[in-house]
Amino acid sequence: MLIAVEGGSLVVAAVLLMMAVLGMAAERFSGMSFFGNLLPFAVGVTLLVVVTAVLLLVWSRLRRRLSQVWQLLPVMLSLGLAANCLWFVFHDGYAPVFTHFRTLVGGKQQAERVTLEHQVYAAYRRYDVNLLQAMIRRAESFRADIEDAAEVFDVDVDLLQGVAAAESSFRPRDSSDGGHGLFQITAVAESLQQQVRQRLAVAKLDLNNPRHNAFLAAATLKQYLGQMNGDLFLGLLAYNIGPRNGGLRFIMQQYGASDFVTMQPYLQQLPRDYPIRVLSYALAFKLWRQDGKLLAYEEGDNAVRIQRLGIPGLAAVF
């Protein structure tokens, strides 16, 4: 058991340290130059492997002496090393290192995701805090219905509130383009309506009823996220476009686009900005729920704090 604990602790420490070193190396040697970037990075990885092997050899010899002093000493030292590595992981300084490591491994997909995330952070940064707070207070009267809808259809509650904020600013109304109520519901498939009627135990849905409206929105968003294989940006874009013109999947096939980044240039400004606007509002709701206030993105270390908190619907930095 002691050997298993010691070995597990060393593995945890080694993996976390390896990720940190590779993340720092990816930041230091990022670029396309062979001699200035690629070759030094490859040499660094080779040295890392050699150093790791040497350290394991040193530990195997050192632990014999440590065991003679006290049988538990190697285990205690390995646990201490793992604990320090874990502390570093949850320290703010690790966030950018881990981001560089994810970019190194994730390649194009991670680079695109980071770009989109910072579009969300930039949109949040530009909002007027007083106007945001006023909208969040208006949302309070609809919170219970939105929370119930999010729970029933397994949708992030802050994300769902972000959709309502982008659609109506929590001022339910009928719009000239055919939208109704809190989430500006338009055409909804009969199968989804049937699901919502069953969940609400009603014979007929009223689009001007905020609870009915929220449940329809949650069911619709859940369906579009499934159609887009869980891609949050595409799911929100599909929600905004709706079924007209064959829906988002048909449009993507028409232009040969495979993700939100490649789809953006073909979109007009309103649908192009829609996912970013929804997620920036969702981020505000998440901050308000967790801290009871909206943090100014550019002040102090708030940017790092917000990035570690994560955008609703997306995994946090770590």
Image (cartoon, rainbow, N blue to C red):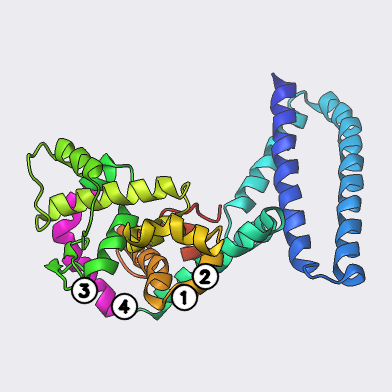
Nearest the viewer among 35 and 168 is 168
Q: Is-magenta flag for residue 131?
A: yes
Mark 2 — residue? Answer: 118
Disc 4, SS: helix
- Number of numbered discs present? 4
- The stretch of residues the image draws in magenta is 130-147
Which residue: 91% across, 31% down? Answer: 61
Q: Are marks 3 and 4 in contact (CB under 8 Å)?
A: no
Q: Residue 150: where, in percent of width, then height?
A: 28, 47
Q: Quadrant of the N terminus?
A: top right
Q: Earlier in the sequence, mark 4 or mark 1?
A: 1
Answer left or right for 304 relative to 13.
left
Name the mark on residue 134. 3
* Crowd around label 3: few <14 · some 14–19 · many ≥20 (10 Å): few
Nearest-to-viewer mark from 2 and 4: 2
Q: Are marks 4 and 1 in contact (CB under 8 Å)?
A: no
Amino acid carrying label 1: it is: Ala
Disc 3, SS: helix
Q: Are marks 2 and 1 in contact (CB under 8 Å)?
A: yes
* Crowd around label 4: few <14 · some 14–19 · many ≥20 (10 Å): some
Marks 3/2: CA–CA distance: 25 Å
Q: Are marks 3 and 2 in contact (CB under 8 Å)?
A: no
Nearest-to-viewer mark from 4 and 1: 1
Marks 1/3: CA–CA distance: 20 Å
* Crowd around label 1: few <14 · some 14–19 · many ≥20 (10 Å): some
Mark 1 — residue? Answer: 122
Amino acid carrying label 2: it is: His
Which residue: 48% across, 52% down? Answer: 231
Name the mark on residue 129. 4
Amino acid carrying label 3: it is: Ala
